Amino acid sequence: MGMLGRSTWPGLTYESTAYSSSCFLGVSASSPSIALLKKNSSNAITLCIQINPVRRRTSMPCKNWRLHALEKTKPIHLPEGEEKVTWEECKQSLSALEFDGEEADVILSKAYGWVHSPYWGEERTKQVPRNELVNEIFDYMKNLGLSDEDLHKVLKKFPEVLGCDLEEELKVNVGLLQSEWGIKGKQLRSLLLRNPKVLGYNVDCKGDCIAKCTRCWVRF
């Protein structure tokens, strides 16, 4: 629907050849196709603008979404033999936190270097998880006030936590949070749910980057 709009400012008028509800002062959100200044017989300056018709999108582009949805996950090459038995034991511990077999494989693979994880960079080599260590991490985090449901959320965000050293990283970092920032109890639980990667920080560049940003306290 088009209509002629005309507005007068002191010594200045404009005319538009199209108008829509998305126009402000007769100019649409899109760029005008023609803009001309002219004088009329009374020496008033007239700004003539032809507004591009407003185009409404009927739907959002979905090509990229379809490509992403159809993209297949790279196959995970799991350990064999005796190592596979240990792997399956760890999967059983994860199943207690409501992870299915496929999800457990992904978590363990990211934590122990069986698939590439940006968190580790190139430093992680393949390791076979030990169920007793996995359960020790679970027990420690539960002692911090995290429930099974909380652990599920933490592992969804940060599966690599299972590959972090319990004594040298998790306990040391929690100690720093408590002593340096006074973060304890419910505050600590909230922080770990929001940013569980803090459990794996092991460097502090102090502003002089050493290219280990995923594990640096500068993120905190």
Image: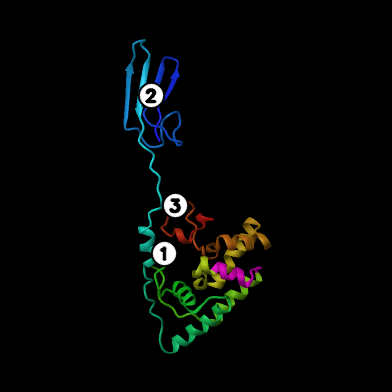
| Amino acid at the residue labelled 2 | Glu
Q: Position of residue 4 (x, y in %)?
A: 40, 27
Q: Which of the image's four quarters has the N terminus? A: top left
> Are the residues tagged 2 and 1 within 8 Å (C-beta)?
no
- Mark yes or no: residue 2 visible: yes
The image's mark for residue 208 is 3
What color scheme is it?
rainbow
* Residue 15, image x, y percentages: 38, 24
Q: CA distance from mark 2 to mark 1?
A: 57 Å
Residue range of the region highlighted in magenta in the rendering: 144-154
Residue at figure coordinates x 42%, y 57% from the top left: 210
Residue 177 at what x, y percent from top left?
A: 61, 60
Q: Tell me the quarter of the picture where residue 174 sits.
A: bottom right
Q: Amino acid at mark 1?
A: Pro
Residue 71 belongs to the span the image colors magenta: no
Q: How far is mark 3 from mark 2, CA to CA?
A: 58 Å
Circle 2 residue: 15
The x and y percentages for residue 76 are: 39, 77
- Report the Cα–Cα distance between label 3 and label 1: 21 Å
Q: Nearer the viewer, residue 55 or 178?
A: 55
